[in-house]
Amino acid sequence: MSTHVPTPAGAQVATEPDAGPSAHPLPGAARPAPPRRRPVRRAPTTRVAGLVLRTPYWIFTGSLAVIFLFPLVWTAVSSVSPQAGTNQTDGWGVGNYRTLADYQAGIWQYLANSAFVSLTTVVLTLAISLLGGYAFARFSFPGRNILFLTTLAILMVPYATMLIPLYVLLNELNLQNSLIGVALVLTMFQLPFSTFMMRISFEAIPRELDEAALVDGCSSWAALWRVLLPAVKPGLITVGLFAFLTAWNDFMAPLILINDSDKLTLPLAVSNLRGQVQGVVDYGATEAGVVVLALPCIVLFLLLQRHYVRGFMSGAFKG
Amino acid sequence: MSVSMMSGRAGRSRRRSGPASPARRGQAVKGWLYVSPTAVFVAVLFVVPLLLVVRMSLSRWPLLTGDQGFNAPDNYTKVLDNRFFADSVVFTVKYTVLATVLLIALGLGLALLVQESSRWKGLLRASFLIPSALGLASASLLFYVLYSPIAGPAADLMANFGWTFLGSPNAALFSTVFLIVWRFAGFYMLLMLVGLQGIPSELYEAARIDGASRWQTFRRITLPLLRPTLALTTIMCVTGSLLAFEQFYILTKGGPDNSTITVVQLIYIMAFQGQNDLGVAAALSVIALIALVVINAVQLRAFHNPDEK
């Protein structure tokens, strides 16, 4: 099931996005030791003429940005503004968040469930891909290529079609209806991206670095912890960020694998919240739920934007 | 997966010849120790379920009682006889074509728009990208409210015109596609930007010296050299759209009139709603899996550049 984009240009983009001086740098796309870029040369235009000519451009791009930001801003604003049929009918306030807090097992329970699943997934993904990436980059062992290709093949197999057998399998392992089971499944689906990412992170480090440590009498384990770990930290942050965003937002795995309503994760709880009160949808509480769901993702994204972009630059999405 | 990258790596890694030395055996043991967690996860949670889904598709396997023995090919005929099967396939394909065309065109357009770096373009890039930080479920819930004829910002307008975003099959389809475009356009823009970055600037300079127009430059340099990226993004987009679930499960619940049931939704319905038949759901999973592999192979062939060997 090996697919690949069979052109030399594809390989170039995938492995060396820096090849050749590029006129279109992506700021924030930090990679190990990027070469100096040449400044962009522009055709000279006078300032005033440029401004007049570019007015339609400002209007066009400005309205595009508004289209992308409006749904988020509108939801955040209306979650605290008065609305008929919600807990917040008069004036501005956090009534909708109070509805959300009191929903069934309570928002704290669902937040805790989501946090547990997300953190377990992040920790497992980091640990497994750190060791796996180290092994794939630095050791030769029988079955290395087969195992690497099988790991990448996870990307080729649709998530949804795997959940039916996983439901049965986790049942056998007594991990069905368990948040640990959900975290294990989500970790497995993170492995192709994160193993690939960690492998290229280790391969970007000069071999001399850990060989020197080994000559000095370090074990390979000590070399990993003392010498290599600091060097692959950016890769780990990218892997952790993607694992968190995926696990926090995942909907299908808990939908299929969890039965008890107090074990649900936040996306499912908010989704269920809609039709619960005599079939009447509480839109205000739904808005509040969306804000609680989206806020950590947007904050993390803004803080770690360049690590997010690196995930794409790495070529790990090339299939 | 990227065989090109694999061979590049293999070429760089050390190749020792000669008989297995103790040092080399030590390497192999250590390598396996470090890789064993990966191996366990891949074997138990990927390879085993992959084999299991095939076995389930050939067995009678109700949700509550489990394996009742071999019954092939009953599950597959039941899938084909399902009254929603043909409609869901048609709908999924329709949705996939629409979403892919729009997302690829918009992703490329946005990438070209924000390609050079400036403060304003950095802001634009960030605002196009922010929706991709949201989960698909959160985005669907957000648009569920936004499209609502009661609480949405266009509620009064909808009341005046007697039209709703999710009221008719076509409106529901286009409204869902809009949600998907909103959520994913920035993501595809980013992939396109990476591709554009790989095009050597000398080519653009040469084109300018030769007096090529903007369109000619785009047509003759950008598009052909972006081919690998276009192939990647199209395959990703087609795969993702064919497996659409959350957006329809949350936004339309398959309605109106069961007009927006996708294949994955049908798998879910077969397994957990009503029929509770995991065998039939597994059979549809296997069909979807094979169809996807075939579709991706066809796409790779179509994108293969005949000028290259």
Image (cartoon, rainbow, N blue to C red):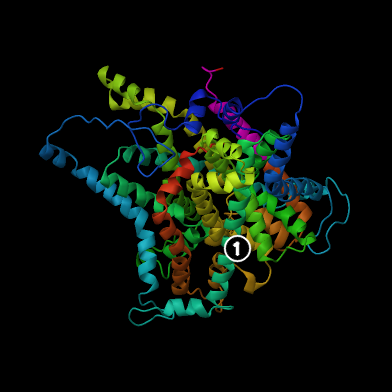
Total marks shown come to 1
Looking at the rendered structure, the secondary structure element under dot 1 is helix
Locate residue B149, reporting x and y percent: 43, 67
Q: Residue furthest bottom?
A: A90
Locate residue A316, reporting x and y percent: 53, 40
Magenta stretch encompasses residue B65: no
Say above or below: A154 vs B159. above
Judged left or right of residue B165, residue B45 is right
Identify which amino acid the numbered label 1 is placed on.
Val
Foreground of the two, A60 or B82? A60
For residue A141, what is the image quadrant? top right
Locate residue A147, reporting x and y percent: 69, 38
Judged left or right of residue B126, residue A266 is right
Foreground of the two, B244 or A238? A238
Foreground of the two, A306 or B132? A306
Subunit of label 1: A
Q: Which residue is drawn at 45% across and 63% down?
A: A296
Magenta stretch encompasses residue B302: yes
Locate residue A191, reporting x and y percent: 62, 47
Looking at the rendering, in which quadrant would you find the N terminus of chain B?
A: top right
Q: Is residue B155 visible?
A: no
Range shown magenta: B290-308
Foreground of the two, B111 or B169? B111
Q: How crowded is mark 1: few (under 14 residues within 10 Å), some or many (20 or more)?
A: many
Q: Can residue B157 be seen in this view?
A: yes
